[in-house]
């Protein structure tokens, strides 16, 4: 879903203490990659070295190691008045969205190097999304356009009772139709980290393309990063969602998961019990991250575990906060994967 600056700054600072980010202008409620607004000027401290980021989102120094994000990019429609159900909303405004695309833009805005691989419709929304990636210095050479399907649409709102409400239009949408022979395998093999979710596993041919892309990355020695990003309304059933998400679980090197997703995948077990979380830790996993919203996050490796508390802020909109968290983590790990061993144990 669309990413907003309030949640972006909160999660990056609270859950990614390895980076120091200073904004030179006030934080405002806005999509993380709007087509009409320029991002704030940022100075990013990475392992003691300051990198300047221009107002157009482009790093002023040499490119950092590449993170390739694979999956969906779509248009979110959000109510112009917050706290209402979709049916009660008087009007909607469009915003670019899709978790993998959010992560790619977030990494670029933190001074990293990112690319997006996915498919949109050969329509006005698809062209708009491609332009937004370019404006935010995200490599889009792996993006494809489908002349026979539309760009995916999603309506999303946070109701007054705190429940998030989704309505998707994908029957099918272009992102579901990405084929294996459309993959830019050279781009994937150049990556330091290959990041993806589970939505691309729901239907063919995108499922096969996803599996082929991940295999190409793994065979090339690329680290695999997985955020399941559970969206039950898109799956045929809860059982198929659980099976699909877990079908690629043991190939990932890094997994980010929420409390709700732990409960879902473990059939209702306590997500705050370390023993329950450890059940999800497979032998090849390097880092398991559990996000807890305003409370911060927990982290687990084979040797140690711990938690980072959240910062107290006045939240504007938490939509996309998980994507912001992932962007902050991956932007740091891409520069030095040994940070998993060297820094987390000192938190």
Image (spheres, rainbow, N blue to C red):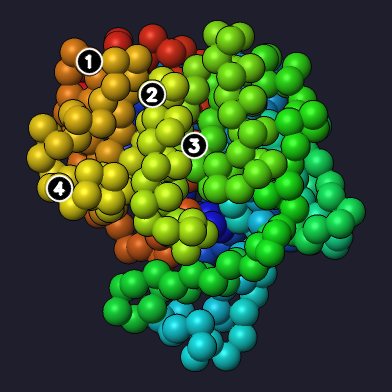
- Give the labeled residue for mark 2: 250
- Give the labeled residue for mark 4: 269
Cα distance between the residues tagged 1 and 3: 23 Å
Q: Earlier in the sequence, mark 1 or mark 2?
A: 2
**Disc 1 to disc 3: CB gap under 8 Å:** no
Q: Earlier in the sequence, mark 3 or mark 2?
A: 2
As drawn, is 320 to the left or to the right of 109? left
Cα distance between the residues tagged 3 and 2: 22 Å
Is disc 4 surrounded by few (<14), some (14 to 19) or many (20+) residues within 10 Å? Answer: few
Depth check, mark 1 against mark 3: the one in front is 1
Q: Earlier in the sequence, mark 1 or mark 4?
A: 4
**Disc 1 to disc 2: CB gap under 8 Å:** no
Depth check, mark 1 against mark 4: the one in front is 4
Is disc 3 surrounded by few (<14), some (14 to 19) or many (20+) residues within 10 Å? Answer: many
Depth check, mark 3 against mark 2: the one in front is 2
As drawn, is 175 to the left or to the right of 196? right
Residue 62: percent from the left, percent from the top? 68, 16
Is disc 1 surrounded by few (<14), some (14 to 19) or many (20+) residues within 10 Å? Answer: some
Cα distance between the residues tagged 4 and 2: 20 Å
The residue lying at 64 percent from left, 34 percent from top is 208
The residue lying at 78 percent from left, 61 percent from top is 150
Residue 36 or residue 304, whichever sits in front? 304
Depth check, mark 4 against mark 3: the one in front is 4
Assign a secondary structure to mark 4: loop
- Give the labeled residue for mark 1: 302
- Give the labeled residue for mark 3: 327
């Amino acid at each position: 879903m669309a990413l907003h600056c309030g949640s972006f700054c909160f999660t990056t600072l609270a859950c990614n203490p390895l980076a120091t980010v200073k904004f030179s202008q006030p934080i405002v409620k806005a999509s993380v990659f709007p087509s009409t607004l320029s991002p704030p000027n940022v100075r990013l401290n990475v392992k003691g070295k300051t990198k300047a980021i221009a107002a157009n989102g482009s790093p002023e120094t040499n490119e950092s190691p590449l993170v390739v994000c694979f999956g969906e990019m779509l248009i979110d429609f959000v109510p112009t008045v917050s706290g209402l159900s979709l049916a009660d909303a008087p009007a909607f405004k469009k915003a670019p969205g899709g978790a993998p695309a959010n992560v790619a833009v977030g990494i670029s805005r933190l001074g990293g190097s990112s690319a997006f691989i996915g498919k949109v419709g050969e329509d006005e929304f698809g062209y708009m999304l491609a332009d937004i990636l370019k404006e935010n210095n995200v490599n889009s050479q792996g993006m494809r356009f489908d002349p026979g399907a539309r760009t995916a649409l999603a309506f999303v709102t946070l109701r007054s009772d705190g429940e998030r409400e989704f309505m998707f239009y994908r029957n099918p949408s272009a992102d579901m139709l990405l084929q294996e022979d459309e993959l830019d395998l050279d781009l994937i093999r150049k990556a330091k980290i290959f990041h993806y979710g589970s939505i691309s596993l729901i239907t063919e041919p995108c499922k096969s393309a996803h599996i082929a892309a991940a295999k190409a990355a793994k065979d090339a020695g690329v680290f695999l990063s997985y955020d399941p990003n559970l969206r039950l309304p898109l799956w045929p059933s809860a059982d198929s969602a659980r099976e699909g998400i877990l079908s690629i679980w043991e190939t990932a090197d890094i997994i980010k998961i929420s409390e709700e997703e732990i409960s879902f995948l473990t059939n209702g077990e306590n997500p705050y019990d370390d023993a329950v979380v450890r059940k999800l830790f497979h032998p090849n996993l390097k880092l398991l991250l559990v996000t807890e919203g305003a409370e911060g996050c927990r982290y687990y490796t084979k040797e140690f575990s711990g938690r980072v508390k959240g910062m107290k802020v006045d939240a504007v909109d938490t939509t996309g906060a998980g994507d912001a968290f992932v962007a902050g983590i991956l932007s740091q790990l891409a520069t030095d994967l040994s940070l998993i061993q060297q820094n987390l144990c000192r938190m």
